[in-house]
């Protein structure tokens, strides 16, 4: 299961182009807080892989992947890159 880089790059680029410099710095800081596995899961998920596909790749349950994605979302949501409504 190779990861097409376009999905993640396109997703990230669509948000970054609408951010001011402080928000961009905060997003980069938040991404740096992710573990390597969290970054890989984020990459796969934003590239269009399902939670089931990611679970199969790592040999874990879909519920484990769901928790990983939740943790990633919490880290990114807590960054100052998001506005008060929790969106970028």
Image (cartoon, rainbow, N blue to C red):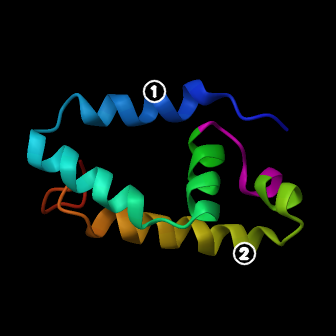
| Figure quadrant of the N terminus | top right
Q: Which labelled disc corresponds to residue 66?
A: none
Nearest the eye: 61 or 76: 76
Q: Position of residue 49 (x, y in %)?
A: 71, 43
Residue bounds of the magenta highlight? 47-53
Number of marks in picture: 2
Q: Residues within 10 Å of mark 2 (few under 14, many from 20)?
A: some
Picture coordinates of residue 17, whole percent (x, y): 23, 28
Q: Residue at x 21, y 56 (%)?
A: 26
Task: Kindly check if marks 1 and 2 are in contact, taking CB atoms under 8 A apart as contact.
Answer: no
- Closer to the chain start, of discs 1 and 2, is 1
At 72% across and 56% down in the image, what residue appears? 51
- Gap in angstroms between the C-alphas marked 1 and 2: 26 Å
Q: Is residue 36 magenta?
A: no
Mark 1 lies on a secondary structure that is: helix
Residue named by callout 2 = 64
Instruction: Place residue 76 in its image quadrant.
Output: bottom left
Task: Give left or right: position of 43 versus 84.
Answer: right
Judge from the rendering whether residue 56 lies leftward or rightward of residue 67; answer left or right.
right
Compared to 35, does 11 lie above or below? above
Q: Badge 1: few (under 14), some or many (20 or more) residues near its Cα, within 10 Å? A: few
Residue at the disc numbered 1: 10
4 horizontally vs 17: left or right: right
Which residue is at 66% across, 45% downward?
A: 44
From the top left corner, tell me how far across and down residue 11 is, in percent.
44, 34
- Residue 66, how many percent across, how many down? 64, 69
Secondary structure category for the residue under label 2: helix
Q: Is residue 52 left or right of residue 25?
A: right
Residue at 72%, 48% in the rendered image: 50
């Amino acid at each position: 299961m190779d990861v097409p880089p376009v999905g993640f790059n396109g997703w990230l680029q669509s948000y970054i182009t609408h951010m001011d410099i402080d928000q961009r710095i905060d997003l980069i800081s938040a991404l740096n807080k992710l573990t390597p596995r969290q970054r890989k899961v984020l990459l796969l998920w934003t590239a269009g892989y399902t939670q089931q596909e990611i679970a199969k790749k790592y040999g874990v349950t879909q519920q484990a992947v769901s928790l990983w994605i939740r943790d990633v979302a919490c880290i990114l949501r807590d960054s100052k890159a998001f506005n008060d409504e929790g969106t970028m």
